[in-house]
Each structure stands twice: as structure tokens, then as C-alpha cells.
Amino acid sequence: MARTPLLQLSDVSLTFGGAPLFANMSLVVHQRDRVALVGRNGSGKSTLMKVMAGLVEPDTGTCTTAPGVTVGYMEQEPRMEGFETLGEFASETLEPGEMYRVEMAAEGLKFDPDRRVATASGGERRRAALARLMAEAPELMLLDEPTNHLDIEAIAWLEQELKTTRAGYVLISHDRAFLRALTRATLWIDRGVVRRQEIGFEGFEAWRDKVWEEEDQQRHKLDRKIKSEARWAVEGISARRKRNQGRVRALRDLRDQRAGQIKRQGTAAMALESGPKSGRKVIEATGISKAYGDEVILRDFSIRIQRGDRVAFVGPNGAGKTTLLKMLMGEIEPDSGSISRGTNLMPAVFDQARAQLDPDMTLWDSLTGDAEMRVSGKADQVMVRGEPRHVVGYLKDFLFDERQARAPVRALSGGEKARLLLAKLMARESNILVLDEPTNDLDVETLDLLQELLDDYDGTVLLVSHDRDFLDRVATATVAMEGNGRATVYAGGWSDYRAQKAEAEAEQEVAQKKQKPSTGASKAPKKDQGTAASTLSFTEEHRRQELPGEIERLEAEIAKLEEFLSAPDLYTREPVKFEKATKALAERQKTLAAAEEEWLALEEKAEAAL
């Protein structure tokens, strides 16, 4: 059955800085499409999305939205001038009484709607922009790197919301697991050409490699033909000049065709070299704790990290992952417990805030101004792992061109800033890498290369990331920080941690069910058989504790919906919104009734077991 087009681009061309970004491009996004938009950093993904959103006007061609279709766009750097709080920004386009939509999204995305815009971090601003889009519920959503700055719990919430939405969406993301779970089609931008394939991201890399293989075969055939025709021209043209001018022109056309082919951008020539080996023991923490006032960050935590380990730190935003890293590295002292470090440690740090990059400096000055990279008496050279390199040559290793060398850091995209920071980090020798959110904004190819470099690195790696696929491919151990000071060490990466945790919880539940009354308890009067229920399982007890908050939230949403529906002219003024609100009210009332019944049943079971 034919699907309804939501948005159509026809013969779109766009030029930036003299080079065409797109030429005569056409594409259609249909109703309920789930599309991954992929391509190298700088290929034009965000620009194409802005064209779709109507924020960038193409040089030629048209962008058409179907009548009555609403398009929502979440950009990487949302502008919030004129708004006092994040909630005010997120609810700007909603009707009075619909703030509950923002509050529901805020709960899933873990941000405070009352936070003042002036004091909000970049991550909080982006979560507010995402909440705004989810609350607006447009027919077509355009999401540019929505998972950046989200913790894994929030990513899981967003993933579930997008799985169940009836809207169509186009996603830009570096998170392989997120793209694999959600997409059914792929738009691939490669050297100004946009290709579409009706496969999700799961099949993208095989498709890309096949296209490139066919391209290489065609180029090889063309090169052979040019070589053959050129030999003919040199050896026989003088004797057949008049009769074969057509063949000479054909040779010229072949050469023009070859010259017009755009070379694929290679992968970054990044390299990691460890310095002198550290001792066998790198870091050993014993019974360490940390709190700020009443907020407990860590309680009685111990870990032993040895040379060559790759330790990942995971958990919700605010759980204390960065604080624990700083304690292990000696930047912050624990309140109690002890930390000893091995000998000959040479750390290199990638910080998630990218504080090592001054936005007002040029890329050139950012490298030559680094004391550890400066070459005495050579203003155009930097020291890279003990060897002098020309600044521009080293920048080219990280896919920057000569024109960018004198550009300010603030002009770079998120992925380019990450590559520049990696250039600074990889220039020095090290034997312990501290990587705090290194995967944000990097394209898939650069992530693959970074993973390979970490695999071959002789030193130790401490890693914070919310990219589940990257964690699975890199980590040999995972420290799960689950709030309230709890931190547990598991073997392996993210999937291994989740499997081990689920197994431990299942074993705990079974053990609780098998518990028998003690000898002393057996002497107590026997309960009536009808009320001698078993104790609550681990899952049931967790649910019993969770339900009151869920009931309270549902009651608040119902009150807001009832207030919204109480407007006497709402039905005649906004019939569609009246219908949606009425349906939402009925759904929440039904959910509330079920939650109350479930809570009462659990309470009765708990009381019967006393």
C-alpha cells in the first residue's frame, strides 16, 4: 500500500564556500518512515536536516511539506534567548494545560523544567529541546544527534518512545545500538550524493562497502581504458591524425571524467603510542567513599586496576562517574578509604567539557600553544610523540584541510572539536588514557578507528561513555554506578554487565522464595493457612516502592487534563485538541485504576507475610 509523502526535496542544490554540498538532489520522506541519516563528519548531514526543516534555503530546487503536516526539528545547539527556564522554552508552542507533556518528557530525559536557562549546561539545554519536540508530537521529527549528553537510562526511554510513536522521523546519531533498534531505511550522504536504501542501519555498512567496491572497479576499468587510449595516441596518432580526431576527443572526455570524480575521504591517520610501561599495578582503591553534603556519591568502593585493563564507568547522569575518575587519578581526595597508584604513570585526558579547547584560538594556535607540543624556535611545528611535525601536516592526519588551520575553534562542528582534542591527546606519550565521553559527535568511521587504536594500545584505559556498542567493543570491565553511593564491578562490557546483573537479581529472587522460617520462628503460633502468604519477591517489593510515585504522577496529569478540558469553548475552538485530551484523560484514568489495584494487592500480600 502506498504511503503518504510527508516531505519532498526536488532538484535541490546548495553551495558553501565555493564547493557544492549537494547538486540536483531529490528525496522523499514518507508517513511513518524511520530513517537513519548517515555520512562522514562535514558531509552535510546537519545542513541537509536544516533544509528539510526549512531553516536553510537551497540555491536551487524546492522543499515541500504535505498540506497540514507539522515538522519538528531538534538542533544540536538550541537557542534559548528570551526564556527564563528550560520548562518555559520546552512548553512555548503548547496550549495552556498541556505542560504535562513536557513534564512527562522531563521525567524520562532527567532534566528539571524549573532550571534557569542562564545556569543550564549544554546537555540540559539539549534535553529541554528534545522534550519540547516530543511534547509537540509533530507528524515528522528531525533529530540531530538526540542521544548526545543523555545517559543510558534516558537513551532507553527515548528509544522506547520512538519505537511506539506514529510519527515519521529522520535521525542523525553516532550511536550504533540506537540506530539499529529504530531505523528501517537509510539516507547516506557521500561526496554530495544522497542515496537511499530501504534497510535500517543494521545493513548500512555492508551496503556502503559494496557501493565503494563497485566504484573502485569502475574507476579501475576507466584507468585501464585511459591508459590504453593514451598509448594508442602516442604510438599512432601522427599517421592517422585526420581520421581519428574523434578518438582523441573521446580520450580527452575520459580524462575529464576521471578528473571529475571526487576522491573518497580517507579515515583519519590517528595513531596512539604508549610511553614507557607503567608498573603492573596501576590503581588500587580500598573502601573509598565520597559525599557532598547529604548527597552520597560513593560508599565503600574498592577496585584494583592493572596494566592493560580497559575499565568502563556507566550510570545515570549525576551518579558520580567523573568524580570517581578524578578520585582514582588523584585530582580529588576521597572522604575515607585509600587509593594507591602504581609507578611511572603518564596520563592523557580527554574531558567531556573539552575545556582544553579555547573557542577563540585558531586550530594552529591551539596546537602550537600547547606547552607539551611546542617546538622551541619553530612556530610552524609541533612535537608529536617525540618527533617534530608541521602543524598543517598533523592537522591533515585528523581530516582538517589547510584552510581550517587558521580558523577559530568555535567554527568547528562537534565532531571536528572531538577530532582536534584527540589530536592534542594523541600527540603525547602516555600509558594511561582517561576518556570522558570521547564518542560524542564522532562519525561511525572515526569511532571504528578509535576502537581499533584502543585495542592495540599497550597502556590502560579508563572510559566513560553512554554508547552501548562502543562499550561492548572496548571494555574488559564495567563499573556500574547506580545512585545512592552504590558502585559494582562487573566483567566485560555493557551487554555482559546487563546479563550478569539480571542473573544476580534472578538468583536473589529465587533465594528469597526459598527462605524458610528460622527455628525460633517455628515455635511461634501458626498463621491461618489462608493468610500465610510468602514474602514479596525482589521484583514485587521494588514495584511496591515504585507505585506510589507513579500513582501521584498519574493523578497530577489527570488533574491538569481535567483543568484543560474544563474550558467551556474548547470543543468548538479546538476540536482536535479536545479529542486528543479526552482520549489521554481516559487512558490515564484507566492506568491509574490498574496501578491502585496493583498497589493494594501488593500491600495485602506484604501484610499477610508479617
Image (cartoon, rainbow, N blue to C red):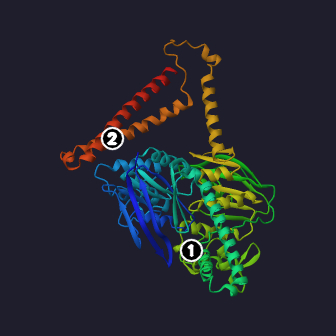
Q: Which label lies toward us, 1 or 2? A: 2
- Which label number is shown at residue 584? 2
The amino acid type found where label 2 is placed reads Ala
Work out whether 237 lies above or below 599: below
Residue 133 is left or right of residue 342, and the answer is left
Q: Secondary structure at mark 1?
A: loop
- Which of the 4 quarters of the picture holds residue 267? bottom right
Tell me if label 1 and label 2 are in contact, CB under 8 Å: no
Q: Residue at x 70, y 59 (%)?
A: 452
Q: Where is residue 386? Give x, y as percent.
A: 77, 74
Q: Which residue is mark 1?
A: 358
Quarter placement of the N terminus: top left
Cα separation between marks 1 and 2: 48 Å
Q: Would residue 550 appear left or right of 537 to someone viewing this image?
A: left
Relative height, residue 30 to residue 371 (above, below): above
291 to 383, vertically: above or below? above
Residue 441 in which image quadrant: bottom right
Crowd rating for badge 1 (residues with CA inside 10 Å; few <14, some 14–19, many 20+): some
1 or 2: tag closer to the N-terminus: 1
Residue 375 in percent (x, y) is at 72, 81
SS of the residue under disc 2: helix
Q: Residue 531: horizontal and vertical position, in percent?
A: 49, 16
Q: Is residue 5 left or right of residue 22?
A: left
Q: Position of residue 194 (x, y in %)?
A: 51, 63
